[in-house]
Structures are given as C-alpha cells and as structure tokens.
Amino acid sequence: MTNQPPDPPKNQLTQMLTVAIQKARVNFNGLSLKKDARVPELQIQDGEDQPVQNYPLVGDRYTVGRSSSASDIVIRNPIVSQVHFSLQRDKKNPNCFYLQDENSTNGVYFKKRRLKKPFLLRHGDTITIAPPTLTNAINISYYNPPPVWVKGLRYGLYGVSGVAGLCAALIGVEWFKYPVYPLPNGVSEPVVIYARDEKTPLNPVQAENHREIDKLSQFSPYLPKAVLASEDSRYYWHFGVDPYGITRAVVANIRGGGIKEGASTLTQQLARSLFSEVGRQNNASRKLREMVVALKLEAVYSKDEILRNYLNKVYLGVGNYGFEDAAEFYFDKSAKNLTLSEAATLVAMLPAPNLYNPVQNYDRSVQFRNRVINRMESLRMISADEADRARRSRIEVSSKAKQALSQIIAPYFHSYVFQELRELLGEDLAKEGNFIVETGLNLSLQAKAEKALKNNINSNGSRFGYSEGAMVTINPKNGEILALVGGVDYKKSQFNRATQAKRQSGSTFKVFAYAAAIEDDRSPSKVYSCDALLWKGQRYKACERSSGNVDMYRGLAQSENAIALRIAKDVGLDQVISVAQKAGIKSPIKETPGLVLGENEATVLEMTGGYSIFANQGIWTRPHAIRRILDGGDCTNNENIDTCRVIYEFSQDPEATRQVISPEVARTMTQMMQGVVQGGTGKAANIGVGAAGKTGTTDKNVDLWFIGYTTNAQLLTGIWLGNDNNSPTRGSSGQAAQLWGSYMKTIIQD
C-alpha cells in the first residue's frame, strides 16, 4: 500500500482558501474594482526613484514579505524578510487594519520607532521597512480617507467648537475694555482730500454746527423705517449681533468667491462709528471688538435709544453727521419733516455718502432711493400707494447743496480718489470716513487739462462727430496722477471716462508687441513683409502706407497693421500679453491676433500707465491718486495733520513698482515712438522736446487715441476722444494727437 500524506486539517484548508482568494483580490487577474468603490490601500514605494505601487485591501488578512509563496503582497527587496509583517482588519472599526511585525529581521518603523506590538493603521500613516535613516528603506503608506461629508462634518464641528470657545474667551477678556456709559460724541471730521500742495482741499464745503434730535418719535416716521429696511430689518429681534445675517453672509461670500456681502447690524455700525478703540482694520480682531461693543450697548441701552443715537450720529457725507444735519443740508428742512421720498434718498446714501448723493449723481440716487422704497413696501412698512407715489417723485435738492457741491475741485479726480480709497482699504473701512487723504494732483495742470478738453470738444467735436473725451497726465517716475479729466462736464455726467469706461485701445496697443519682440532679441532693424497675411483663420490687409519689406522703425511710425501682426506672430502672442499685463493692463486680454490691433478694451488710465515703462527705463509704477491716507481720528495734535496716524503710504507699497523691460529696450522704444511723432501718424503731436508717443484708431473711427510723453520733462499724457454710445466719428487719431500737442505745450512752457 502506497504511503500518502495525510489530509490537511479542515482549518488549514480554510486558511489556504482565504489566502488564495485574497491573492486573487490583490492581483485582480485582469479584473478591476467598480469605479465608485472605496477600499483601503497600501501604497508601497521601493526606493525614491521607483513608482508607487497601490494594493487595494479588500480582504480581512494579508501577509507582506519577499516570498511569493508565503506572502499575499510581495516586495522583492533583500531587506524584506520572507514574511515581514501581517495586516488584520479591525473588527470594531472595519476601515482600519492592525499591523503586526512577524519577527522580521529589519523590523517595521513608525516615526523612527520600531513596532513590536500590534499597531492600528489610520489614514495617512506612513511606516518604513528597516530604519528610516537608511537610504534604501521602503516607505509604505496607508490610504483610506473618510468620505468628504464625514470630513466636512468633522472639521465643521471642530471649527464651530473651537471658534465658539475662542470667541467666548475673547469676549470675556474684551468686555471690560470698553465703557459704554456715557456714549462718546462720535462726531468728527469727514474725508478731506488735499492736492499735492497739502494745503488745498478738493472739497471746500464747510460743515455747519452739528444738530441732534432728542427723541426717536420726533424724527419723520418714515426715517427709522427706511433705515431698518435698508440696514437691519431684524433689528428688534437680535441682541446686537445677528447670527442669521452672519450665516447668510458667509454662504453668499463663499458662493461669490470673495467679500460680496456684510453682516454688520445697526448696533455694530454704531459701535464702529462711536468707539475709536474698535479700530478700522478690515480683519477678524476688529470684527470681534465691534461685536463685543455691540453686545454691551444692547445690554446697557434700549433698542430705541440705540436707534436714536444712530440716526443722530451716522456719517452722511460732506461734513454731515446724522439725519438732522443731512436733511437741513440737502432739503432745507428738519429730519422731523422729511417725506418718504426724501427719507429714502438720505438712507440710500449710507453705503457711500460722498458718491451716492443726489447732487453728484442724480440718476444713481433715484435708483438707490427706489430700492429702499421697494424694500420698505416688501416689509409692509408702507402701503403700495405710498411707495408708488414716492417712486414717481423728483428729488428736489436745495440750491445751497448744489452750490456747495459744485465747488469741488477736479470732480472726476475727486470721485476717483474714493474708488482708490475703497481698493486700498476695503469697502467697509473706506465708507467709515474720517480720513485725511494726500494726493499728487497738480492744480495748475488739472485746470489746463479741463480747459483743453472742453475747448477741443466745443471747437472740433461737432465737425468731427465726437462729443466726449478723457485725459490723464502721470509722472512716469513715481506713478502720481497729476491731472485727470473724465468728461467734458461733471455736472451733466458723472461717468468717469478716464477710469470707468472700457474702450478698444486700437493701435496704441501695438507698442507692447514691439517691446516684446525687442526684449526677445529681435533687432528693430529687422524687416517684415507688407503683404496681406492669414493668421488663425482671419485674413488681414496689407500695409496701407508702405510696401515691400519695412523695418520696425517704419512699421511703428506708420502704424502698419501687417507689420505689427507679423512681429507678434514672430515673438508669440503669449509674450505680447505678458508685457502688457506686467505694464499694468488688468482688463481681460483674449489671446487672438486681433489683440495686437487693440481689439481688447482698457481704460485710459490703464493704457496711459502702461506707457510709463517706456518713459521710465522699463520700470512700471502703479498709477495712483493717493500718496498717503491718515486717520483723522487718531492725531496727537488736531492742528497738524503730520501728527495723525498713517494708515497707508504709497512709497511703502512693495507691489507698486516692477521692472518690465530692460532700460535698453525702453530707450529703443522711445526712439521708435519719437519717429511716430516726427514723421509718422502722430505728427500733430510734434512739439519738439523729444516728444514720443503712439496714435490709435478703432474701426469706423469710434475711438481716437494718442498716448505720449516728453523725454526732458517727466510728463506722460493719454487722451481718448469719442462718443459714449460707441457711434462712429468723422475724425482720426490726428485730433487726439493735436489736442495732446496743444495741451502739453502749455504745461511744458510753464
């Protein structure tokens, strides 16, 4: 009888079968997991230069080692034992595995500690076979991230708990720092903007004596309703801080990808206005202090007392604090007697009283007034008949207010200062007011720019078919805006065509293509064909004023489209865009051949600032109106503004200046643009003194441009002429060049 080996025990057969199944699951034999299947993985990297191998763990037990016959997961490396370690699924937590060293020679390490007892692996844990200090140690990571919703819930709970605890602690610390009885006066100076002489305010309006109303019931009944409808409709429901409003604002800001909505209650606004200790910084600590003061105000004063103080002290522009001051200034009446339309008009000014008042921008004032009225109607504070009658009413402003506000010097520049103020400080801080702003405005240049533009429109506008224009003069060395005119008559139109209007830049954009090519070592003497060309499916005409092959000098001087296109094709559109963007062109630029010819849109201020790289040795400095911003409420001597705390100073802005092209390229471009003025399309701007510049005209002569500078006087001026409705003109860039020449001649002679 032949001797045969005994049958293996039953439990051994089961174990062998399990191992076989596990191996099949690991290797998959050509199969794969479902696309949405989530299983733990071992990620093994055998050497830094080797790819990571992923091993899904679908079974309950695995062995890892060098032996292919004894190990489920094989690592063929001499430092690995035949069976190095094993993995066993945790019965209590099936998403985790216990790792057990199987008496390996070189061991298993976690954070330089050898594991001798079972070790529970969690997502993100990395272990090494052999000490991690060895160069040939093998790294093994356990990958099993929780579902997104679990992570979100977990971190959300952590975050809410942490923030709640921190806020409670900070509130306890801050609570006793702010005495709220009696209330501080809170009435201080408005935003005062000075010209470069640091003596002349651009808005000479002088505030009258401040007046307040003693009882909430004495205000016009429409006024408190309008304020609550516009600023804080849940005022009588919250305790100074509105959790619902905060949640809504957070959601809106996350969806909008930025700060789109605030959550300050009316009580918080009063706290920020009255207590200088709260601060003006746009950060979380200031918000916390603001909330603490608001909570304390609500604990000490009644809702009606807080609302009365708000109505008496909130800033409403041009030196007016409270609705009594504003009502007297704009409507020659007490706040007790305001109509619904008048009350809504004043409330609509709250977000930005220097911009939204009915004198400086009547149309916007009507629009925002109607929003307040509609909100009051939707909250059933007024009837539909009252709302309809108020919306159909004119805003009748007093002649005193019109006369006072018409005295603003350089009104387009003045309005741009507030735009720049918001960009520098943020919307919330900027609208608080009480700032002293120093600018670089040159009063003499400003007056000449306003006069030059108005005279040109009056004398040439009807003949050449344009009715509007814009001018900007910059010092290219430091970026200061010396003069800015955004239209012919600010009283008729407050739309700022120098800073708000996006116009096609025409051939003025070509200089960036030429600069990119020369910067990329193309010689300006290189010649290009004047023939028509086909590029990206678009056919472009041949040269209009040249023929044959011409060099860059003539191509730019005669503004030949075919030459500019070939130069851009030679150097690459991406390089052209790069130079333009580094030169401060923030408006979107599409990567198409037409960008070379100025199909993209930009503001006059952007384009003029872009030319500073040629006038200033290749260096771009951000064009700016504001030199310094001082805190008018934080001065050691109120008679001396130099003792006030500096909030912002341009000279300390690290992102305001950058080298865009080399000085050599800038000098070459200046020589080429001098050719434009001396014998090219910009001859009307030839005033000598090394004038350099570039003309620009768009299809059907809709936009007429000239941007140029002088080499012996640090003055850079950009000019645009056209119509607000984009209708064609009968002019050319020659009119813009002529205006540039006559204006620059007057200011250089001084």
Image (spheres, rainbow, N blue to C red):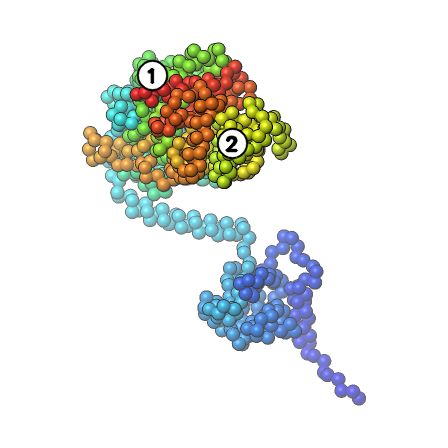
Q: Is residue 369 visible?
A: no
Does dot 1 land on a helix, a strand or a loop? loop
Query: Would you place residue 508 above or below residue 126 in this image?
Result: above
Kindly tell me whether residue 32 is visible in this rendering: yes
Density class for disc 1 (Cα within 10 Å; few <14, some 14-19, many ≥20) is: some
Q: Indicate left or right for 566 with 296 as reference.
A: right
The part of the image, by quadrant, that contains residue 208 is: top left
Residue 297 placement: quadrant: top left
- Crowding at label 2, few (<14), some or many (≥20) Cα neighbours within 10 Å? many
- x%, y% of residue 440? 32, 28
Lower sequence index among marks 2 and 1: 1
Q: Are marks 2 and 1 in contact (CB under 8 Å)?
A: no
Mark 2: amino acid: Met
* Label ID, residue 406: 1
The answer for how far apart the CA atoms under marks 2 and 1 are is 49 Å
Q: Nearer the viewer, mark 2 or mark 1?
A: 2
- Coordinates of residue 140 in the picture (x, y in percent): 54, 64
What residue did someone put label 2 on? 552
Determine the residue positioned at 55% across, 23% down: 545
- Residue 645 vs 694, above or below: the answer is below
